[in-house]
Amino acid sequence: MVRKRDSFWEYAEDLRNGRFLCKFCQKDFAGGISRIKSHLSGIRGRDVEICLQVPVDVQLAVVQAIDTPSKKAKTVAASNNTLEGESISTSSSAQMPNIREEKDKSIVDQSFAKLLILDSICSDAIQSPFFNDFVKGVAEYGPGYELPSSLTLKSLIMPGIKKEVEEYIHNVKIYLVKTGCTLMYNIWPSRNSYFETLLTYKNIFAYTPRGLACMDPSPYPMKELLLFEEAMSSIVEEIGPRHVVQFIINNDSDDSDEIRSTKDMLKKYPWIYMTNCATHGIGLLLKEIYWISFVYNTIQVAKLIVTYIYKHNVSVPLRRVRKGRRNYISFDICMLISLLEVEDELQALQVSIITLSTDWGRTPNYKQVGELLKGARLIDHAIHCKEFWIRGKKIAQVLRPMLQALCLVDGGGATSGYLYEMLERVKDAIIQCHDNTNFPYDRIWEIFNERRSDIIHPIHAIAAFLNPAYMCSEKFKENVELTNGINFALEHLVDEEEKEAFINQVQLYRMKVSNLFTAQAIIMLKTYHPHIWWECCGNHFPVLQKYAIRILSQPCGSSVCKRYQLRPKYGDDHAFMVNTMIMERHKVLETQMFEAIDLDKLDELSDNINYQHIDHEEWDDGDFEGLLFDLTEGRVNDMIDDVTCSWLDKWPLK
């Protein structure tokens, strides 16, 4: 039988004199197929010069062929053994109990736990989407999957990923020539476990609609402000000063030195405008309003009802909200909104809640029965308290658009064309509560106006004006802020030789002339992101198109940077590691970045608010359970008999 010619001869020419010619690098070497594979593998130290021109897919195939011949033999042997015993394994597997499946999983779980322990891997690693992707990939591949060798990882797979990341960064830099970019930084502390010292790391990022990129290559914490300023200035020069549109700062006292340093650096680039992080500002707005006693007390009563419902398995279609690890205020607001959705179902209960509790018959003694009954009477009263529902609806009416605004800017997309409109919705919601006598309108209005001045920059006003969907809507009204926004852009962003054309084209845009607002352009208003709309439809107004794309392509918040807090280790390529994380997340969000944002659906789409049914145990709040048990029978009776519902203004309930 003639031996089959090795497939890798396809990439080399046999010179018939004991030598071969590589078809990629055009160099000839002595030897046969083994040396051909060594040459194409890219693995040094195999007694032959490596090929620098070989395509990655060919190189990967060669490395796998070199690395796994014995494994393939083992696989074949195992397959033969399986075939010989097929009838036995088939008959036995049909009768295999679920106990074995559970036992097998337990063994795998223990092996995984040992890996975490012995290799000092944090257990939080299982929450990483990259780890989950790997596990799913192995499961989809099947039992035949074998881990690559360390040599394969270091010599081929890792360099391949690095090349992919470099291409991603290259595309980001190419795209920012058209859209400009926003620079932002993240400052975060991390304790050095060896010296037990607290280090402060500073990472600088560049954002474009094509993606985010970590631009600071330094793996070490910057202790001197001078180094921070030099790093920022160096990055601006690397990108090209005229390609930097905005710098977002986190207007926090902790970052005051960095803010001053940034302002000093930007004096060299007067066209780069500096804005406060809207995510931080809206978060502070929500926090201040949340802690107003009227708002806080009402939300706590709602939380008490929801906790009791799930603690005692009351059957109502209450949507679940995933508990966030960092933002308890967002969670509590979502919980209130979820409760308001089932008001009718709760009030339609024909019997006391306590009789509906599935665990009622499991109470061990009469004392606990009495405590449960006391708590049930209070919860039942709260559910049928008209004043509670009125307050809850007013609070949700104001807080929901605020939460939507937070979701808007916290997502990491190009949101500058939407922020002004979203805060106008918040303002309208507050104004609608003006006539409610019990509602703390004046205090909320004062907080909103104070915080809004820190959030809204003149650039956000002109961005709203340049968002064609908003400008063409019935809600749009020109005012002094919009005029100031146009003047700001004219003074700071527009080149001197383009100012006259800019003003003329702004007037034509305001008039909605037909050669701009064509039938196709009007259809695209609701489906395409504003900067894409201008790119596709604004060719008749080239100057306005140029600046509209740059303004509308920028984000409003820098909180996205906090997702990539990766403490570097000595010798790590820190920027590569961070950008790998960014690139993988960008693959998921890429299509969304070019679509119009529906402000009405923000609370359903964001990570902050995720309606879903989850395990009852997550609602096991001992503090709230304790509140019910601490109340005396007399206090509960007084609360139920109080026609003014004054107990709603007193928290904790005592």
Image (cartoon, grey):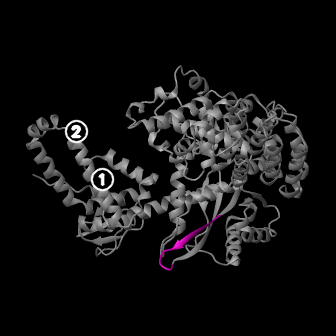
Label at residue 98: 2
Residue farthest front in this picture? 634
Residue 22 is at least partly visible in this image: no
Which quarter of the rendered picture does the C terminus lie within? top right
| Residue 356, image x, y percentages | 47, 26
Q: Nearer the viewer, residue 401 or 588?
A: 401
Q: Residues within 10 Å of mark 2 (few under 14, many from 20)?
A: few
Q: Nearer the viewer, residue 595 or 106?
A: 106
Write the residue at 57% across / 57% down.
563
Write the residue at 66% across / 30% down.
641
Secondary structure mainly formed by the magenta segment: strand
Q: CA distance from mark 2 to mark 1?
A: 17 Å
Label at residue 109: 1
The amino acid on which the numbered mark 1 sits, given as a three-letter code, is Asp
Write the residue at 29% across / 64% down.
37
Label at residue 38: none
Q: Which residues are magenta?
A: 186-195
Q: Considering the numbered disc 2 on the image, is that residue within a helix, a strand or a loop? A: helix
Write the residue at 40% across / 36% down.
363
| Residue 52, image x, y percentages | 41, 68
Q: Considering the numbered disc 1 on the image, is that residue within a helix, a strand or a loop? A: helix
The amino acid on which the numbered mark 2 sits, given as a three-letter code, is Asn
| Residue 230, image x, y percentages | 70, 75
Q: Is residue 191 magenta?
A: yes
Q: Is residue 342 magenta?
A: no
532 lies above or below 206: above
Residue 1 is at least partly visible in this image: yes
